[in-house]
Amino acid sequence: LGANVVLFGQTFDEAKTEVARRCLEDNLQLVHPFDDEAVMAGQGTVALEVLEQVPDLDAIIVPVGGGGLLAGVATVIRALRPEALIVGVEPENAACYAAGIAAGGPIVIKTKASFADGLAVAQAGARTLLSQHLVDRVLTVSEGAIGAAMREILSAEGATVEGAGAVAVAACLGNAMPYLWGKKVVCLVSGGNVDAATHSRAILSDVAAA
């Protein structure tokens, strides 16, 4: 399609800074990956598909990085299935959304390496945080829990998922939400972009720690 793909930096925030510079320099349009109303609306269509398949769901568990997916999903679920519980889950090594809620607005946090690198952003979106009143709970999960979830998904479903895609399942594997036992729960598994070495290291991480 004629796109010019540029790989820059080691983190989302390094790449974002470079994108902003190039947009200013070359008069380009910046499409933010999560803090954009149109992007959030698009992500919300996931919830429409979920409700088509599971109209009577009791809860939906959503991965959280900058918060765009959570904002879009929460908006749709709260409008069409208002009694459902909406839970956001982020890696404890990059819990910027919870930090933003606690601070009353987006703040920059210091992140650590995470198997859920697709969620490892240092600051939640100002727009995404506006929907926090629609969300019932925001949880964090450990690296060991993320690895265990990746292993469980591989074992149960034969699917290789990235850490960012496994955090919702990670929250359900422990005892963080006993009130959901026996309920109809949907976990959004949001991606499979992981190399073999990282996946192997992740699924063995909590075994090595045991």
Image (cartoon, rainbow, N blue to C red):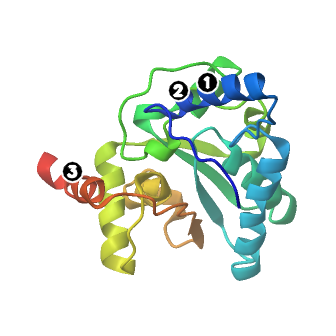
Q: Looking at the image, is 22 positioned above or below residue 209?
A: above
Residue type, mark 3 in image: Ser
Where is residue 89? Give x, y as percent.
Answer: 53, 47
Q: Give me the residue at 37% from left, 40% from top.
A: 114
Where is residue 169? Give x, y as percent.
Answer: 45, 61
Q: Earlier in the sequence, mark 2 or mark 3?
A: 2
Residue carrying label 3: 205
Give the camera-side residue of 93 and 13. Answer: 13
Query: Marks 1/2: CA distance?
Result: 5 Å
Q: Decide if residue 210 is in sight here.
A: no
Q: SS for tag 3?
A: helix
Q: Which mark is residue 5?
A: none
Q: Give me the residue at 71% from left, 21% from top.
A: 105
For the residues labelled 1 and 2, say whether their Cβ atoms are less than 8 Å apart: yes
Residue carrying label 2: 14
Q: SS for tag 1?
A: helix
Q: Earlier in the sequence, mark 1 or mark 3?
A: 1
Quarter placement of the N terminus: bottom right
Where on the picture, by quarter, is residue 161? bottom left
For the residues labelled 2 and 3, say whether their Cβ atoms are less than 8 Å apart: no
Residue type, mark 2 in image: Glu
Where is residue 67? Give x, y as percent.
Answer: 66, 41
Where on the picture, by quarter, is residue 175? bottom left
Residue type, mark 1 in image: Thr
Number of other residues with Cα within 10 Å of mark 2, as a class: few under 14, some 14 to 19, many 20 or more: few
